[in-house]
Image: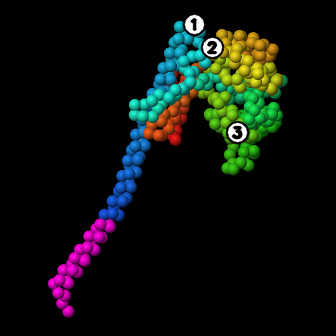
């Protein structure tokens, strides 16, 4: 039976509609992924641009901090005394500077030589002594916190574990911890048997709780192994670190009142000499080991630059360890975003 011309035309129109719908469906199937990819590309490009912009501002802040340190050294030389204290421009509180594109940038400098040097613990004790002067300092530092509170015996146990972490053997010392202790961890690991490369490694040492690490971290540093003898700057050290300076064989830190007294005597301008510090009322009656006396100073070469910027609601941070010699150079950088 033959279809009429009108029926054939209707059938052709139906077929054309199906083809059109098919083409439209294929187009949609192609366009949607392309749109998603394009949107993702734009987001990646924007994030990349923001990251580069943030990095440029932070590196600029680092360079400004380096100029401040150089200027400070030149001023000290003009005055005939290379001293670093908390009255100097580099130690001022950080301020947020508005950026032309919106957002802000801020940065600050901290004296790393005002902190306890963790790798000083590997110096062996003198004959007849249980601990070296630096090891006694660390035992005292562990006891300066009210939260978490650490007893003298616990402080000795933690110090022994730190010493085992650093030494080159696998034989645990009394109250210490070596590989056999860490094999029971999840996941298991081994003692480093070397000097600390970063303060953060302390979190892996036996008997070190997260709360205690967070309390300790602001008072510790790891200076680069350059072979130079670096001294503790008593003019920038916080009270907790100053309280670790006690008589040989006395594992107790100075009291909180004595620590505050040292800060008041020091003031913003600092002590004029190490002798002035040692002759101050809290220290005059203490019999510090000669090695500990020789490790006290008034100037610094290592600083921590902490920079932070907010661009388009994205927080980016930069931490740089700066060494000040004839020039200032960054030894280590670490960055991250929120």
Q: Which residue is at a point 81% across and 32% down the rendered structure image?
A: 152
Mark linked to residue 80: 1
Q: Secondary structure at mark 1?
A: loop
Q: Earlier in the sequence, mark 3 or mark 1?
A: 1
Q: Which residue is at a point 67% across and 10% down the rendered structure image?
A: 273
Q: Earlier in the sequence, mark 2 or mark 1?
A: 1
Viewer can see residue 32? yes
- The part of the image, by quadrant, that contains residue 265 is top right
Q: Nearer the viewer, mark 3 or mark 1?
A: 3
- Asked if the magenta segment contains residue 12, the reply would be yes
Q: Which residue is at a point 37% across and 58% down the rendered structure image?
A: 33
Q: Residues within 10 Å of mark 2 (few under 14, many from 20)?
A: some
Q: Is 207 on the left or on the right of 227, as rendered?
A: right
Q: Which residue is mark 2?
A: 269
- The part of the image, by quadrant, that contains residue 208 is top right
Q: Earlier in the sequence, mark 2 or mark 3?
A: 3
**Residue at the bottom extreme, as displayed:** 1
Q: Secondary structure at mark 3?
A: helix
**Residue at the left extreme, as displayed:** 5
Q: Which residue is mark 3?
A: 211
Above or below, comparing residue 160 to residue 83 in the picture: below
Above or below, comparing residue 164 to residue 108 in the picture: below
Classified by dominant secondary structure, the portion drawn in magenta counts as helix
Q: Position of residue 226 (x, y in %)?
A: 60, 24
Circles 2 and 3: CB atoms closer than 8 Å: no
Q: Which residues are magenta?
A: 1-26
Viewer can see residue 297? no
Comparing 66 with 222, the one in front is: 66
């Amino acid at each position: 039976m033959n279809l009429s011309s009108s029926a054939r035309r209707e059938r052709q129109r139906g077929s054309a509609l199906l083809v059109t719908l098919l083409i439209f469906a294929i187009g949609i199937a192609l366009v949607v992924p392309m749109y998603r990819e394009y949107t993702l590309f734009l987001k990646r490009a924007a994030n990349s641009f923001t990251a580069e912009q943030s990095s440029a501002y932070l590196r600029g802040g680092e360079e400004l901090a380096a100029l401040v340190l150089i200027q400070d050294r030149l001023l000290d030389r003009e005055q005939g005394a290379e001293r670093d204290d908390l009255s100097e421009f580099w130690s001022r509180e950080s301020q947020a500077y508005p950026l032309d594109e919106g957002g802000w940038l801020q940065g600050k400098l901290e004296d790393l030589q005002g902190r306890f040097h963790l790798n000083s613990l590997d110096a062996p004790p003198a004959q007849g002594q249980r601990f070296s002067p630096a090891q006694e300092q660390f035992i005292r530092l562990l006891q300066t916190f009210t939260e978490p509170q650490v007893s003298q015996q616990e402080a000795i146990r933690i110090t022994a574990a730190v010493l085992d972490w650093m030494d080159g053997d696998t034989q645990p010392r009394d109250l210490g911890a070596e590989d056999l202790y860490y094999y029971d961890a999840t996941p298991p690991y081994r003692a480093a048997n070397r000097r600390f490369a970063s303060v953060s490694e302390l979190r892996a040492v036996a008997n070190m709780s997260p709360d205690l690490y967070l309390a300790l971290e602001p008072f510790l540093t790891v200076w680069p192994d350059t072979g130079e003898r670096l001294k503790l700057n008593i003019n920038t050290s916080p009270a907790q670190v100053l309280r670790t300076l006690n008589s040989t064989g006395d594992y107790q830190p100075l009291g909180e009142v004595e620590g505050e007294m040292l800060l008041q005597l020091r003031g913003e301008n600092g002590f004029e000499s190490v002798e002035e510090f040692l002759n101050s009322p809290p220290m005059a009656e203490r019999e510090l080991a000669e090695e500990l006396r020789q490790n006290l100073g008034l100037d610094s070469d290592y600083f921590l630059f902490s920079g932070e910027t907010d661009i388009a609601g994205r927080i980016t941070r930069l931490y740089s360890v700066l060494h000040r010699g004839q020039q200032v150079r960054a030894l280590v950088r670490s960055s991250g975003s929120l």
